[in-house]
Image (cartoon, rainbow, N blue to C red):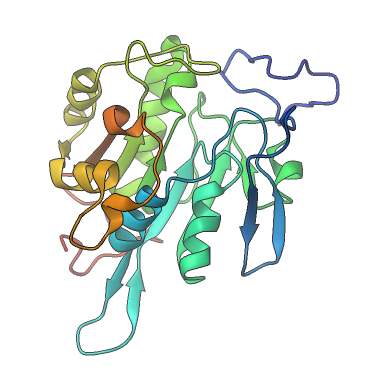
Amino acid sequence: MWACADAIPGKLTSTGAWCLTHRVAGARGVVSFPDTGVSYPIPAHHQPASQRIVHALSKLLRKPINGTSRSTYLSLNDFGAGVGQYGAALKAIDASFRWRGYDGAGNVENWTKGMVNWFDLTIPLSLPRADWVLALEVAEHVPRRQEGIMMRNLHAHNCMGIIISWAVPGQVGHGHVNLRTSGYVIQRFESLGYAYDPELTKSMRHGSAADGSSRLHSHPWFLRSLLAFRRIQRVRSHGCFWPDWRN
């Protein structure tokens, strides 16, 4: 972790991260973890969670056990978690969701009161695997020369697949230094042994009219940048679910 006391607000580091600061016009909301009572404001250059994506994630990660009222919960590593917007939103639905959040902002642990762990996505990591990795609005911030290590980390920390948004050429945003076409992203992950999942991608981007999720709020850039990938061969690992994983 690096110090933020003397950092210039919003200034990028060599890894694409920056120190969190309060919005000049006031917070765009509050992140609250109902199971712990922890809450804090959403900082500058961050957005509230997409309700549509949260809904799709909740369906992906919570698997009803046939013949019972119970569910099995798949685990989620949130890489580039911001201040835990998606983890808090999932926990608000069901405290049993198994979420871990990591982000590269130097003061993220202080800001989130320990709910999000600091990490550096541009060096090889060895963290606990999860069934899925979520990487929203992070890839475009990683300098191109470090793109390979970032992808290695996403690949090394999931058992089932990856849900990623990667800003496309022409998409403006704070700290966007590495924009990529969706075709490029699909090719790179296919080379690592993943299959692009158009149905899951559609669910994350557009929701469903059948369950009303298409009417939930989302951010417009996800309609072009969000992609979902499943491993062709699932990985066995501690912390990951094994039976009926194809469901």
Quadrant where the image shows the C terminus: bottom left
The image quarter in which residue 172 lies: top left
User: Relative to 175, does residue 207 appear above or below in the rendering?
Assistant: below
Quadrant where the image shows the N terminus: top right
Which residue is at 45% across, 30% downward? 137
Which residue is at 52% across, 25% downward? 123
Q: Residue 161 location, x and y as percent?
A: 27, 46
Total label count?
0
Which residue is at 47% across, 71% downward? 96
Q: Residue 192 location, x and y as percent?
A: 22, 31
Q: Residue 17 location, x and y as percent?
A: 60, 23
User: Relative to 91, does residue 130 appear above or below in the rendering?
Assistant: above
Q: Residue 78 location, x and y as percent?
A: 47, 45
Q: On the picture, is 236 further left or further right than 47?
A: left
Q: On the picture, is 5 further left or further right than 195?
A: right
Which residue is at 51% across, 29% downward? 121
User: Relative to 158, does residue 225 appear above or below in the rendering?
Assistant: above
Residue 157 visible in the shown view: no
Q: Nearer the viewer, residue 21 or 192?
A: 21
Residue 175 visible in the shown view: yes
Q: Nearer the viewer, residue 170 or 197?
A: 170
Q: On the picture, is 82 further left or further right than 19?
A: left
User: Relative to 145, does residue 40 appear above or below in the rendering?
Assistant: below
